[in-house]
Image (cartoon, coloured by chain):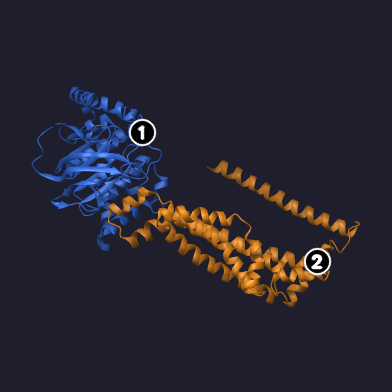
Chain colours: A blue, B orange
Amino acid sequence: MMMPPADPIVQVRHVSHQFGDEGETRHVQALQDTSLDVARGELLCLIGPSGCGKSTLLNVMGGLVAPTTGTVTVAGKPVRGPMPHDISFIFQEHALFPWNTVFENVVLGMTFQGVPRAQREERARRALEAVGLSEFAAHYPGELSGGMRQRAALARALSLETDILLMDEPFGALDEQTRMVLGEDLSVLLSQSHKTIVFVTHSLGEAVFLADRVAVFSARPGTIKEVIAVEEPHPRKPDFMTSPKFHRLRDELYSLLHGEIRKAMAETPQPRRRYGEPAPADTTGTAQ
Amino acid sequence: MRRPGAGKRRERGLSRLVQVGFAVFLLAAWYVATTWGEVSHLLLPNPVNVWHQLVSILASGEFVPDLRVTLGELAIAFAIAMSLGITLGYLISRSPYAIKVFEPLFSGIFSIPIILFLPLYVLFFGLGPASKIALGATIGFFPIVLNTIAGFGNVDRVLIAAARSMGAGNLQMFRHVLMPAALPVILAGLRMGFTVALLTIIGSETIASLSGLGHRIVNLAENMDMARMFAYIAFVVVIAAFLNAVVSAVEARGRR
């Protein structure tokens, strides 16, 4: 384990979480005694085998799931529910409201957050311009490609002007090329703004390319096994991906994860999955 | 884009032509069979005769009281079914436990022929419009409540999580997330509820009633006034088709 960062904006202390009660068939110990500090302005990746509780930890940090035990503080305040003024979320996909246009989606987010009416449209226009979607403001999400939908979701999150962005496998459903381009854009964004980002992924390459630090999870019941630093300034260019350093870090991550993935795959999959519950053990964690 | 569009339009034009041709063929067969054939006019009156009766019914305005009774029953029955169905459906959809209890119960009851309870309803509510309203509201209630449960119960959880993370309150959640997600499903339920209420009301008027379009048709049949009865049937068919077209148009508008 590395030394904890000097200026943590998020502090996770001894968080455990279980779904269902002990003895029930649906009982799953998703997270076990996990502690973690997120430094102000860093991009921290959470990586681990499917079902290790990395998404659960993200939801706990954002106040969407109350942990069974343990505490989370964000900017000095204890987390007891969603904190829309400090934290915005980006989900895997289909989290835009399909009955609203892209523009309306961005405005609606600010309506929920409580931004004064007079500021909403101007801020929505700026956010869409920042992600390069100005021309598609009047389109419905169903008319856009997966990559454009995630740009729109990013615009909605940016317009909320929170210090912290929590991203739950935001590029997980996209193809490799779109994913790489969006990753580069995110790296540029990070170098310009001073946002703190926690990013859940199961892609080793994505983790090394984007992260300042990578937290590696063990198999279920998940906890953080190791934190690896990637010392490389943002914005990162595609040629970083061909550097020896990139490959060394990627290999290091893979050797840390390899055994955990085998363990996770040996578990029986859960019969059904509700939102926020860990995914059944599958093979997606082994690729890349 | 133009080519497949044109092809589809031509295909639709062709199927319309076949549909109209089929109707014309039936009318022609009817005319031929009753003008030159050996068909008894008590069983099947001549279409020309039916047409004259229809003109007389419309010109005299004698249909107005019966139409008013039937449409009045339908309006009240549908209003009851809609308000009860949507309110109860929403309340049930808020609890997974209530969904587990009531969803199978309601779809079970809806699958039995509720029209069998008409004699009971007549005993309770009399031969007048009240028994038709009660039965129409009962039958119309089920598709509305079932679709309301399905509409509010199956909102994508990630949309709810997203709205919550951005700070949506309960009212905002209802207005901007739950309602738009559920609306198309609820509208389909309302259309079904309207249709079954209409069928039930006209059907039960023909079985036991004092007035209404269904009552009029049976009355004419019992008096062997076949041409006029056929004219009334044609009139009711046109009214029903018109009402269904209106309801479908409202549903399509709501879906946008």
In this figure, which residue is indicated by the disc labeled 2?
B50
Q: Is residue B71 visible?
A: no
* Extreme residue in the front direction: A23
Place residue A112 in its image quadrant. bottom left
Mark 2 falls within which chain?
B
What amino acid is found at the position of numbered circle 2 in the picture?
Answer: Val
Amino acid beneath label 1: Asp
Relative depth, front residue between A171 and B156: B156
Query: Is residue B240 shown left or right of residue A178?
Result: right
Is residue A279 in view? yes
Question: Residue B73, relative to residue A161: is it above or below?
Answer: below
Mark seen at residue B97: none
Local packing at callout 1 (Cα closer than 10 Å; few below 14, some 14-19, many 20+) is few
Image location (x, y in percent) of residue A102: 35, 51
Relative height, residue A48 to residue B237 (above, below)? above
SS assignment at label 2: helix
Q: Quadrant of residue A240?
A: top left
Crowding at mark 2 (Cα within 10 Å: few <14, some 14-19, many 20+): many
Q: Nearer the viewer, residue A238 or B178?
A: B178
Chain at numbered mark 1: A
The local secondary structure at tag 1 comes to loop
Q: Residue at x 43, y 53 (%)?
A: B153
Instruction: Measuring from the top left, give residue B134's x and y in whole percent.
Output: 59, 69
Q: Which residue is mark 1?
A: A175
Q: Position of residue B152 (x, y in %)?
A: 43, 56
Instruction: Find residue B65 and report its horizontal and vertical position in percent.
Output: 68, 77
Q: Would you place residue A215 above or below residue B16 in this image?
A: above
- Is B6 situated above or below B248? above
Whole-Å distance between the Cαs marked 2 and 1?
A: 67 Å
How many numbered markers are drawn? 2
